[in-house]
Image (spheres, rainbow, N blue to C red):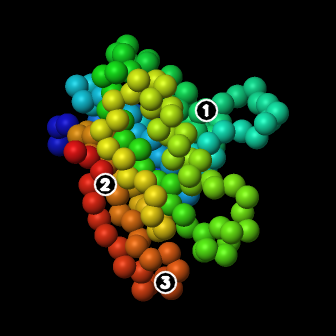
Amino acid sequence: MSESHQRTEVFLKPGEWYFGGEETLIKTLLGSCVSITLWHPRLKLGGMCHYLLSQRKNGEISDTFSGRYADEAMLLLVREALRSGRPLREFQVKLIGGASVLSASERDAKVTDVPGENIVMARLLATQLGLNVQAEDFGGSGARLVLFDVACGDVWVRQSSERDAPVGHRASHRKRAST
C-alpha cells in the first residue's frame, strides 16, 4: 500500500460484517461471539464478520441474511469474496473468539453453550466451504480485541486473561493470530 492512501478504520459491532481493500483496518471486540476473516494475499482484499449465534432458532424465517448468525454471516462474506472473481480456495481464513465470558454460576443456569456452538459452527463452515484456515484463536474466559489489517492479512488479538477481575485490574496478553 502506498503512503498516499488513507487508512479506513471500521469497528464491527455484534452482527456486523465488512469487506474492503488494502486501505482497511477492521476491529471488533469479542466475548462468546466469533469472528471469521477472509483475505486474498495477491489482491489485498478481505473481510471480517462478528456473529453472535451459530444459526437462527428452528422455524425462524427471514427474507434477508443477517450477520448475527454464523451461517448467514459467512454467506455474506463469501458473496463479497466471490465478486473479486477469484476462487474461495485462494483466500486465507482465520477464526477467532468463542470465550466463556459468563461466570460458572451463570454458565450452569444456561441450557445452551453459545461459545461452544459458535466455535463448532466456524470450523464446520470452513470445512464445508473448503476454506484455507491459517489460524484459530478460540476459547478462554476473557474478551478479545481483534484487529485485522487487510493490507497484509495480519490479525492481532488481545485477550483479557481474567474474566472476573475488576476493570482496571485485568491482566492481558497480546498475540498474533497469523502464522
User: Regarding mark 2 in the picture, which secondary structure is present there?
Assistant: strand
Q: Amino acid at mark 2?
A: Trp
Nearer-the-camera pick, 152 or 58: 58
Depicted 38 relative to depicted 68: above or below:
above
Residue 42 horizontal side relative to residue 20, left or right: left
Instruction: Check disc 1 and report the residue beneath it.
Output: 72
Q: Quadrant of residue 108?
A: bottom right
Residue 69 horizontal side relative to residue 140, left or right: right
First in residue order: circle 2 vs circle 3: 2
Q: CA distance from mark 2 to mark 3?
A: 23 Å
Instruction: Check disc 3 and report the residue beneath it.
Output: 165
First in residue order: circle 2 vs circle 1: 1
First in residue order: circle 1 vs circle 3: 1
- Seen at 51% across and 32% down, the residue is 125
User: Regarding mark 3 in the picture, which secondary structure is present there?
Assistant: loop
- Seen at 37% across and 79% down, the residue is 171
Depicted 69 relative to depicted 177: above or below:
above
Tell whether label 3 touches label 1 (CB within 8 Å): no
Which disc number belongs to residue 156?
A: 2
Q: CA distance from mark 1 to mark 3?
A: 35 Å
Q: CA distance from mark 2 to mark 1?
A: 25 Å
Q: Nearer the viewer, mark 2 or mark 3?
A: 3
